[in-house]
Amino acid sequence: MVYTKEYKKKIAFEYPCYICGTVLSKARQVLNHVNSTHGYDLPARPVGRRRPEDPKYTYVNNPQNRQDFEDSHFSCSSCWFHCPANDKKGLVHLAQHINKTHRPVNVDSSKNNNGQINGGQVDKITRYKTLPDHQAEDEEDELQGEEDEDMDDIKRDSKQIGISDVYQKLSELTAMFQNLFNGKDQNDNSDTDADKTGGEHASSSAEHHMQKAHT
């Protein structure tokens, strides 16, 4: 197949042990497995660096089903090397690369028969987790149901917000009218008290003048 700028093959990575073929989920897990199970120490990838882009491939991280990618590759846990997993010799190629490029250090010869077990003897992998061919129908229905529930919540919240706004406006109008009426009552009471006080003062003054004239 000729790869063009517009087309890149989608691949997903698997991380098998190059000695026994056990597939693990991360590169660091492979390094720990090789050390604890087979007695070899391997270098780790540089921290903080991403896999370089490839002109032929698009990398698919964390695929959910087999429809998310076109091919699977075995990835080296110590560098960015990878090779097709469908090839019967894929695991052998991975072991050859690791032994030649990274030169594993034998830290416990009791686990590898004094270095005699060093990869390349096994060409089959063991997967403890396999991806489904496609997304299950019940999962699709569940996702659709969750989307419908979210939409119902949004509509319900919108209605509640509209009703709350109406109640708030009514409360504000009621409070405004109450303030107006209370202010008017206070003014009327003030005028009445003033008239009453003025009348009492005028009556007292008239009585005083009458008493003075009589005298």
Image (cartoon, rainbow, N blue to C red):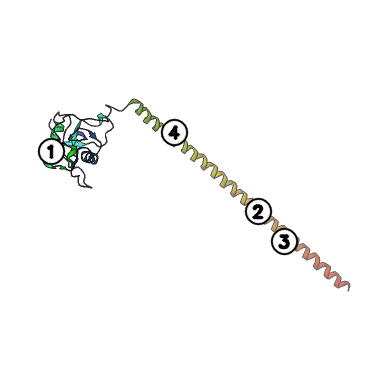
- Residue 96 image position (x, y, % from top left): 12, 36
Q: Give me the residue at 83% from left, 67% from top.
A: 207
Give the image quarter of residue 202.
bottom right
Which label sits on residue 184?
2
Which residue bears the numbered disc 3? 194
Q: Give me the residue at 54% from left, 44% from top.
A: 168
Residues under numbered marks 4 and 1 in contact, where contact means CB atoms less than 8 Å apart: no
Residues under numbered marks 4 and 3 in contact, where contact means CB atoms less than 8 Å apart: no
Which residue bears the numbered disc 4? 152
- Residue 163 image position (x, y, % from top left): 52, 39
Viewer-closest of 177 and 127: 127
2 vs 1, front mark: 1
Q: Mark 4 or 3 closer to N-term?
A: 4
Q: From the viewer's perspective, is residue 89 above or below residue 175? A: above
Task: Say which amino acid is labelled 2.
Answer: Lys
Give the image quarter of residue 125.
top left
- Residue 97 image position (x, y, % from top left): 12, 38
Q: Mark 1 or 3 closer to N-term?
A: 1
Viewer-closest of 118 and 61: 118
Q: Pointer 1: residues within 10 angstroms few (<14), some, or many (20+)? A: some
Q: Give me the residue at 65% from left, 53% from top.
A: 184
Which label sits on residue 97?
1
- Residue 169 image position (x, y, % from top left): 54, 45
Label 3 residue SS: helix
Task: Say which amino acid is labelled 3.
Answer: Ala
Viewer-closest of 30 and 212: 30
Quadrant assignment for the C terminus:
bottom right
Task: Say which amino acid is labelled 1.
Answer: His
Which label sits on residue 14?
none
Quadrant assignment for the N terminus:
top left
